[in-house]
Image (cartoon, rainbow, N blue to C red):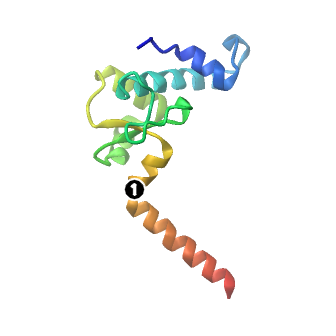
Amino acid sequence: MDKIDYIEIYNKFYHRKNSDDHSLKEKEDYRTLNLKLKVLNYYSKNTMSCSLCGYNEEPLILQLDHIYNNGAEQRKAFGNGNKFYRWIIKNNYPGGFQVLCPNCNWKKMPHIRKQRIVLDYWNYNSNLY
């Protein structure tokens, strides 16, 4: 498998040709995106695809899933985004993660889906009265 060019993927989806012309926020976003793509590439075994359904058309929408549903604890301990991706790389890509598309990640959380369905039903019915 060819090595993935992270900058090419970034340019393809965000049309950034010259990062020197952009704000500090955009440069930070670029660094975070680059780290995210490296982490996703590792955990997807260089396929940049969902480990359940195989979706690979837009790698930027793929998500890093905590297999043991301990994401809240890890975010408290290590932070989000850039900090979290740096922690993963610094700790030599620890186990317990997989790459999922948003649909498969959503399907994995039945307790959240159930709560949202109840809330939607309640909101819909309360508008009828």
114 or 45: nearer the eye? 45
The residue singled out by tag 1 in the image is 109
- 47 vs 65: above or below: above
Amino acid residing under circle 1: Met
- 120 vs 59: above or below: below
* Position of residue 108 measured from the top left corner of the image (x, y, whole percent): 38, 52
> Is the N terminus in the top left, top right, bottom left or bottom right quadrant?
top left
* Position of residue 89 measured from the top left corner of the image (x, y, whole percent): 35, 22
Residue 88, can we see it? Answer: yes
- Please rate how many residues cluster around mark 1, counting C-alpha atoms within 10 Å: few if below 14, some from 14 to 19, many from 20: few
Residue shown at 52% from the left, 13% from the top: 5
68 left or right, relative to 101: left
Q: Report the residue that reaches farthest toward the bottom.
A: 129
Q: What secondary structure is found at the residue carrying circle 1?
A: loop
Residue 67, quarter of the rendered image: top left
* Position of residue 120 measured from the top left corner of the image (x, y, whole percent): 56, 71
* Position of residue 49 measured from the top left corner of the image (x, y, whole percent): 44, 31
34 left or right, relative to 128: left
Q: Report the residue that reaches farthest toward the left.
A: 95
